[in-house]
């Protein structure tokens, strides 16, 4: 697996080694020892999968207690995947990194604990699969507003109005949102 740095040093784009022939392909998407050797010491406790139609924007979600690191990959379709640093003591606080993930490029994004995560569906539909380093806890989940001008994410929107949930429409601005710290 190859590590590709993003604009935020802790958010990593991972490109697997793909072994393919006329029958199809094989790739390893996770090996605990390789991740540890490369500075990602995550114990995964939950796997999630979602399917969304084109134009759907999900996020930007994060948890203060039980913060989730996420290893995200697309198994069908294509998305623009985003991580926003919510760690109040970080030099990259409030900054974002975004990458195209697709079934075709087979890349994965490592989103560390303390980051808000979201994605926008570019293809007709997309299925994401992601490993989480802690359990989902709705009592501690927060939403950062997807289009906060202070964060300035450059979403590659297909139309001006993405499909949003009520929770995501009501996301908070960075200035109002609770920030993550290891003692949260």
Image (tube, grey):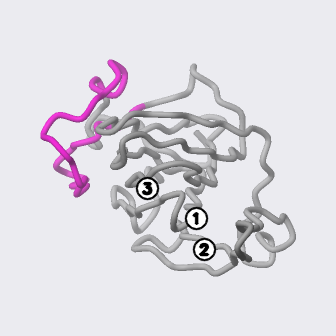
Which of the 4 quarters of the picture holds residue 49?
top right
Left or right, residue 66 beside residue 50: right
Say what secondary structure mark 1 lies in.
Answer: loop
Which quarter of the rendered picture does the N terminus lie within? Answer: bottom right
Q: Earlier in the sequence, mark 3 or mark 1?
A: 3
Q: Where's residue 184, x and y in %?
A: 58, 39
Q: Which of 106 and 40 lies nearest the eye of the viewer?
A: 106
Is 121 situated above or below 41?
A: above
- Seen from this angle, which residue lies furthest right? 33
- Magenta stretch, main secondary structure class: loop
Q: Which mark is residue 85?
A: 3
Label 1 or label 2, whichever lies nearer to me, is: 1
What is the tally of numbered marks visible in this picture?
Answer: 3
Left or right, residue 107 beside residue 16: left
Q: Which of 43 and 74 lies nearest the eye of the viewer?
A: 74
Q: Which of 79 and 31 lies nearest the eye of the viewer?
A: 79
Q: Earlier in the sequence, mark 3 or mark 2?
A: 2
Residue occupying the point 71% across, 33% down: 135
Cα gap from disc 1 to disc 2, whole angstroms = 7 Å
Cα gap from disc 3 to disc 2, whole angstroms = 22 Å
Q: Where's residue 5, x and y in %?
A: 50, 78
Residue occupying the point 70% across, 73% down: 22
Residue occupying the point 32% across, 18% down: 166
Label 3 or label 2, whichever lies nearer to me, is: 2
Q: Earlier in the sequence, mark 1 or mark 2?
A: 2
Cα gap from disc 3 to disc 1, whole angstroms = 24 Å
Which range is magenta?
Answer: 143-170
Q: Which mark is residue 8?
A: none
Q: Which mark is residue 106?
A: 1
Q: Which mark is residue 15?
A: 2
Say what secondary structure mark 3 lies in.
Answer: strand
């Amino acid at each position: 697996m190859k590590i590709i740095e993003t604009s935020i040093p802790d958010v990593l784009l991972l490109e697997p080694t793909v072994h393919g022939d006329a029958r199809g392909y094989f790739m390893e998407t996770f090996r605990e020892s390789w991740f540890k050797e490369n500075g990602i010491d995550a114990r995964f406790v939950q796997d999630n999968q979602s399917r969304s139609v084109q134009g759907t924007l999900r996020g930007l979600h994060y948890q203060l207690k039980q913060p989730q690191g996420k290893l995200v990959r697309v198994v069908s379709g294509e998305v623009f995947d985003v991580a926003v640093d919510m760690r109040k003591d970080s030099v990259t606080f409030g900054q974002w990194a975004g990458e195209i993930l697709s079934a075709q490029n087979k890349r994965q994004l490592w989103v560390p604990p303390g980051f808000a995560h979201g994605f926008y569906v570019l293809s007709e539909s997309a299925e994401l699969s992601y490993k989480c380093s802690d359990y989902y806890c709705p009592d501690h989940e927060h939403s950062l507003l997807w289009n906060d001008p202070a964060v300035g994410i450059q979403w590659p929107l297909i139309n001006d109005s993405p499909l949003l949930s009520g929770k995501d429409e009501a996301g908070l601005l960075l200035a109002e949102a609770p920030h993550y710290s290891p003692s949260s």
